[in-house]
Image (cartoon, rainbow, N blue to C red):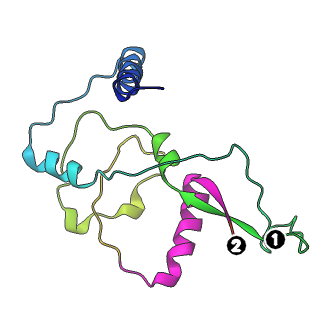
Amino acid sequence: MVSIPRITAHCLVSWDAMLKYTRVKFELLTDIDTIMFIKRGIHGGLSQCSSRYAQINNKYMRSYDSLKSSSYLMLTIYLWAMCQSLSYAEFRWVEDAMNFDVSVIASDSSIDYILEVDLEYPHIYTINILIYLSVRCGIAARQTRG
């Protein structure tokens, strides 16, 4: 049986090893507005990998077999996000946030942005957004039965 303190200790050792290996120095955030902005964007959750391999079968696949039951992949942003770089210094507010144009940011930009947005869209577009994220961001997938 593994105890919670032991798991926490392993996580801290991994974090410390990463900091030593990368020689990253985090900037101390002193502006309360910046701190609260970032804290509002932190969400908890659960990520679970039940199997190492998933094979899908549905009418959208070239290898579709109509004799077998259909299966699909559910998308999760968590694994993709864990593979992205972490902002660690030189935090600044955008000067003119109301006229900030996200579309001009190059996909390989060395500048990171933390955005708070309100989105309104018809519920029917939810699957299209998830498909877009999976193609654009290489999001990991989880198998479900349909």
Considering only order in the chain, which callout, 1 or 2, is on the residue closer to the N terminus?
Answer: 1
Give the residue displayed 51% in from the left and 79% down from the top: 125
How far apart marks 2 and 1 lie (CA) works out to 8 Å
Number of labels in the image equals: 2
Contact check, label 2 and label 1, Cβ < 8 Å: yes
The region drawn magenta spans 120-144
Q: Main secondary structure of the magenta part?
A: helix
Residue kind at label 2, given as amino acid type: Gly
- Determine whether 145 is above or below 24 in the image: below
Q: Identify the residue position indicated by label 2 in the image.
A: 146
Q: Identify the residue position indicated by label 1 in the image.
A: 69
Q: Is residue 35 left or right of residue 70?
A: left
Q: Is residue 16 left or right of residue 36?
A: right
- Determine whether 75 is above or below 127 in the image: above
Q: Secondary structure at mark 2?
A: loop
Q: Residues within 10 Å of mark 1 (few under 14, many from 20)?
A: few
Q: Is residue 126 magenta?
A: yes
Residue 120 position within the rendered picture, expressed as x and y whole percent measured from the top left: 36, 79
Give the residue displayed 45% in from the left and 26% down from the top: 2
Residue kind at label 1, given as amino acid type: Ser
